[in-house]
Amino acid sequence: MVEFDVVELEPTDHPEAGEQAPDFTRPLVDGELWTDVSLSTLLDDGPLVLLFHPMDGAFPATYAWNEIRERGWTDEIAVVGLSISTPYEHKRLIQERGVDARLFSDPGNGVAEQYDIVNDLDGMAGVSEPRPAAFVVDADGTIRYAWVAEEWPSFPDYDAIEAAIDEL
């Protein structure tokens, strides 16, 4: 069994349900290639789930994508991930783990700063990643459900996300 310390995270002022999702443009990766895409452009195709996760290869990212695959969300709605991992790492994660979603690459962690969900990594000066977070966003860009981790590691309430998806 892997042992780790649970770390309490500082409160944030992240976007809440009823607010507009901050727009951004970053490389969006699928299993083949990547191109710069904005969140608002994705919303032109309808609502989506935006999942912020730790860097690829970290167990919370793997666990979250396995859970999403098992629940079949991508058959119902666009699910888009975002982490500090590079496009090359995202491409490998998608291919090796069978992730049926596209992933934004944000190595500078600027989107997490916009959403106020930065997680400074202990023992790594100047290195941060987004804390685990999930936002269900309607086609107008309004957040319908928001969850942001208050401790690390932490996982979203997948049933609550499914309920929000069903309400769209």
Image: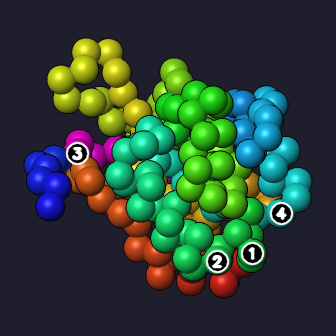
140 on left or right of 71: right
The structure residue drawn at horizontal position 75% and vertical position 75%, both measured from the top left corner, is 75
Q: Earlier in the sequence, mark 1 or mark 3?
A: 3
Q: Is residue 47 above or below residue 141?
A: below
What's the magenta region?
A: 9-16
C-alpha gap between disc 3 and disc 2: 30 Å
Residue 37 picture location, percent across and down: 80, 35
Q: Depth-wise, is mark 3 or mark 2 nearer the camera?
A: 2
Quadrant for the C terminus, please: bottom right
Which residue, given by chain and number where applicable, does mark 3 sit on?
Answer: 9
Question: Considering depth in this image, is 97 or 142 the residue closer to the camera?
Answer: 97
Q: Badge 4, how many Cα within 10 Å: few under 14, some, many 20+?
A: some
State whether residue 84 is above or below residue 127: below
**Disc 2 and disc 1: Cα gap in Å?**
6 Å
Describe the element under mark 3 as helix, strand or loop: loop
Q: Depth check: 7 or 138 in front?
A: 7
Question: Which residue lies under the disc numbered 2?
Answer: 72
Mark 4 lies on residue = 46
Secondary element under disc 4, as helix, strand or loop, is loop
Q: Main secondary structure of the magenta part?
A: loop
Q: Residue at x 79, y 35 (%)?
A: 33
> Going by the image, does 42 lie left or right of 54?
right
Whether tag 4 and tag 2 are in contact, CB under 8 A, the answer is: no
